[in-house]
Amino acid sequence: MEENVDQKRQLWLTRVEPYEGESISHFLGRFRREKGNKFSAPSGLGDVAGLGAVLARWEKFYFNPFPTHQELEALATLVEVEADRLREMLPPPGVGMKHSPIRLCCRCYAESPCHQIEWQFKVTVGCASHKLRLLSKCPVCEKPFPIPALWVEGHCPRCFTPFAEMAKYQKHY
Ligand SMILES: [Zn+2]
Ligand SMILES: [Zn+2]
């Protein structure tokens, strides 16, 4: 175990600070791409963490079976974010996930550029802080949003409309 931890430290990974409310998918994508980390695929990071293919499932919001404390601890060692903090990037017990469509509150994104885990809860009807319905595809070209792990520039991958500029298309509720 000691040896294992040392091995991981030798990778000189760059720590990434989580955003408030950030989903695990968005966080893992940012961590993989961070300068010096460069894991092009979730499997690369999963292998180093000793988690195998499970991270690819988490990036798509598939949490069945639910991430165990051991898995979160293994990831915590690697990304240097505490397991309890990683747990906050997952749905609370008993809350069902919507795998698709990927949803977005553009006002929130403009304030804090991340995908929030609660947008994918089945029970979520809109953004509670802005009182706006969530977008479930690009309102300009109608392309569905990619999984948050792939949100690099914060714009639609097809028409390049910035997420932060889509707010005018969100309806009040
Ligand atoms: Zn919002
Ligand atoms: Zn678009």
Image (tube, grey):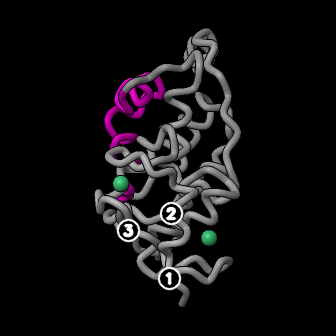
Q: Which residue is mark 3?
A: 136
Q: Amino acid at mark 3?
A: Ser
Q: Amino acid at mark 1?
A: Lys
In the rendered image, the quadrant that contains the N terminus is top right
Q: Is residue 63 above or below residue 52?
A: below
Q: Nearer the viewer, residue 172 or 115?
A: 172
* Residue 153 % position (x, y): 51, 39
Q: Earlier in the sequence, mark 1 or mark 3?
A: 3
* Residue 58 % position (x, y): 40, 49
| Beta carbon of the mark 2 residue lies under 8 A of ligand 2 | no
Q: Which residue is mark 2?
A: 166
Check whether the beta carbons of the residues at disc 2 and disc 1 lie within 8 A of each other.
no
Q: Earlier in the sequence, mark 3 or mark 2?
A: 3
| Beta carbon of the mark 3 residue lies under 8 A of ligand 2 | no
The magenta stretch spans which residues? 41-65
Q: Nearer the viewer, residue 65 or 116?
A: 116
Q: Quadrant of residue 97?
A: bottom left
CA–CA distance in space, label 2 to label 1: 11 Å
Is there any visible trace of residue 58 in the rendered image? no
- Characterize the local packing of mark 2: few (<14), some (14-19) or many (20 or more) Cα atoms within 10 angstroms: many
Q: Is residue 32 above or below residue 11?
A: below
Q: Which residue is mark 1?
A: 171
Q: Residue at x 54, y 90 (%)?
A: 173
